[in-house]
Image: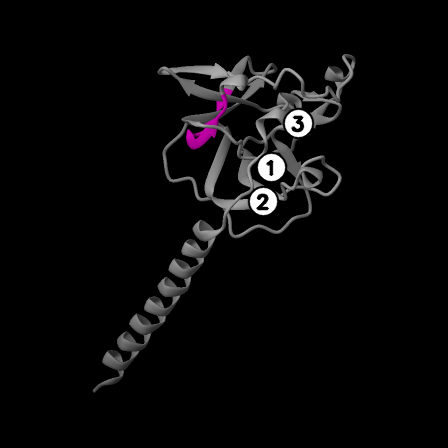
Amino acid sequence: MNFDSSFKIHIMKRVSFLLLIATCSFVHIHAQELNCLNYQLYTVDYDVVEVRNQKTRGELVITTPTTNPVQLIVDEDSFALFPKQTHFPNTGITAGLKVVLTNSTAKEVNLPSISGKIRITRQALINNKWVDVKSYDRTPKRVCGTSYSAKSTIKANSSLLFALPCIEGTIHTKYRLVLHLKDYRKTIYSNAFDGYISRELI
C-alpha cells in the first residue's frame, strides 16, 4: 500500500470519527427534555431572556440566503440556561430554547426595551393566522409603565444570546418571535418553531 492510499484511509477514518461524535452530540441535545412553563405564570414582558457570559454548544450557521442585516433565529436543537437572577429558576424552569439575534451591519442598532430588557414578543399560528400570545390574565405584573424608554442596543457585527421557555398547553402550534425596529421602520420575524399553547394565552 503506497503512502497516498494510507493517507486517504487515515483521513476517511478521521472524518468518520468526527461525524460519529457530531451525531452523538446531536442526539444528546435532542434527548434532553425541557421543563415547560406553566401557562398561568406566563407574561409577555418576561418571555425572551437575554443570556450573558454563557458558553454555548457551537454557533448557528445561517444557510438560507437573506437580505436582512438583522436576524432573529430560534435554534430548536440547542438550549440556553436562564440567568439565576430571573424568575424562571424559581418556577423550576432552568433552560429554554437558544435564540440568537445577529447584527451584520457596520452600525449599532437600537432595540426596543422595557426596564432595560430587550423586548421580543411571541406569536402563535392559530387557524392559519399569526396572533400575539398574551399574558395569562392573573399573572402578576412586574413592570412599571414608565420603563419603556430604557435603551438597549446591539453592536455592529455582533450577536446576542437569549433563552426562550417552552409553554405548557394542549394545543400544538407553530411559534415565531417578533422584533420591532422603529429606527428602521421594520419588523424582524424569526423562523417558525414547534410548541404547545393554552387557550388562555390566545
Position of residue 190 in the picture relative to residue 94 (left or right): left
Q: Which residue is mark 3?
A: 46
Mark 1 or 3: in front is: 3
x, y (%) of residue 58? Answer: 51, 52
Is residue 196 found inside the magenta-colored segment of the image?
yes
Q: Residue at x 53, y 39 (%)?
A: 97
Q: Residue at x 36, y 35 (%)?
A: 64
- Marks 1 and 3, the one that precedes in the sequence: 3
Position of residue 180 in the picture relative to residue 172 (left or right): right
| Whether residue 57 is visible | yes
Element at badge 1? Answer: strand
- Magenta segment main secondary structure: strand
Q: Which mark is residue 162?
A: 1
Position of residue 28 in the picture relative to residue 5 (left or right): right
Label 1 Cα crowd, 10 Å radius (few <14 / some 14-19 / many 20+): many
In front: 195, or 118? Answer: 195
Q: Which residue is mark 2?
A: 80
Amino acid residing under circle 2:
Ala
In front: 169, or 187? Answer: 169
Q: Residue at x 61, y 28 (%)?
A: 47
Residue 94 placement: quadrant? top right
Q: Are marks 1 and 2 in contact (CB under 8 Å)?
A: yes
Element at badge 2? Answer: strand
Residue 51 placement: quadrant? top right
Q: Which residues are magenta?
A: 188-198
| Whether residue 190 is visible | no
Is residue 52 found inside the magenta-colored segment of the image?
no
- Marks 1 and 2, the one that precedes in the sequence: 2
| Residue furthest left as drawn | 1
In front: 144, or 156? Answer: 144
